[in-house]
Image (cartoon, rainbow, N blue to C red):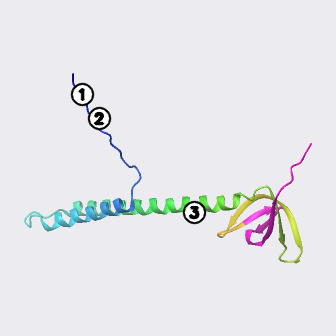
Amino acid sequence: MTSINSVNRTTSTAPTKQQSQLDKDLFLRILTTQLRNQDPTQPMEDREMIAQLAQFSSLEQISNLNQAFTQFVNSRQVDISQYSAMMNKEVSWTDEVTGQKEAGVVKGIVKKDNQFFYLVNEEEIPVGNIISANERPSQSE
């Protein structure tokens, strides 16, 4: 009877910052080694050099774009989720113009110029102006 040994293998699909940096460094080291060790009687053609530099540039730009997109997605999730708990709650605030206390129910969230507003009574109220928030009483039929 033969036995079969199994090998468990795990792979990571999420690129790490260190791995990304290693790829850039490795590419540059290969390119400089190639240039250093080329035959002086048969130097690398300009087209080959330009193609390799274009590949490096593309790699770096894609890497930067991926990082920026990841940061954007993470910031959007944190921003909206931070304020979404106020949906359908009764809030009160002091009106900046009249100085009077007003109240209403949060019906939405708006972001303008990196500032968040609650939609209350068809008005946009800055989140920092809210002075109290309460659960709405349940409406019995």
Q: Nearer the viewer, residue 122 or 86?
A: 86
Q: Amino acid at mark 1?
A: Ser
- Name the residue beneath numbered marker 3: 75
Q: Amino acid at mark 2?
A: Ser
Q: Quadrant of residue 10?
A: top left
Q: Which mark is residue 113?
A: none
Label 2: state its secondary structure: loop
Percent position (x, y) of residue 62?
A: 41, 59
Pointer 3: residues within 10 angstroms few (<14), some, or many (20+)?
Answer: few
Picture disc at residue 6: 2
Tell which of 27 and 4 is nearer to you: 4
Are the residues at dot 3 and dot 2 in contact (C-beta closer than 8 Å)? no
Q: Position of residue 29 (x, y in %)?
A: 22, 65
Give the residue number, with chain letter if any, for mark 1: 3
The magenta span reads: 117-141
The image quadrant that residue 3 belongs to is top left
| Left or right for 96, reference 46 | right
Check the image and name the residue furthest to the right. Answer: 141
The residue that appears at 75% across and 59% down in the rendered structure is 86
Frontmost of labels 3 and 2 is: 2
Q: Element at badge 3?
A: helix
Mark 1 lies on a secondary structure that is loop
Front label number (1 vs 3): 1
Task: Give the residue at x 48% y 63%.
Answer: 68
Amino acid on which disc 3 is placed: Ser
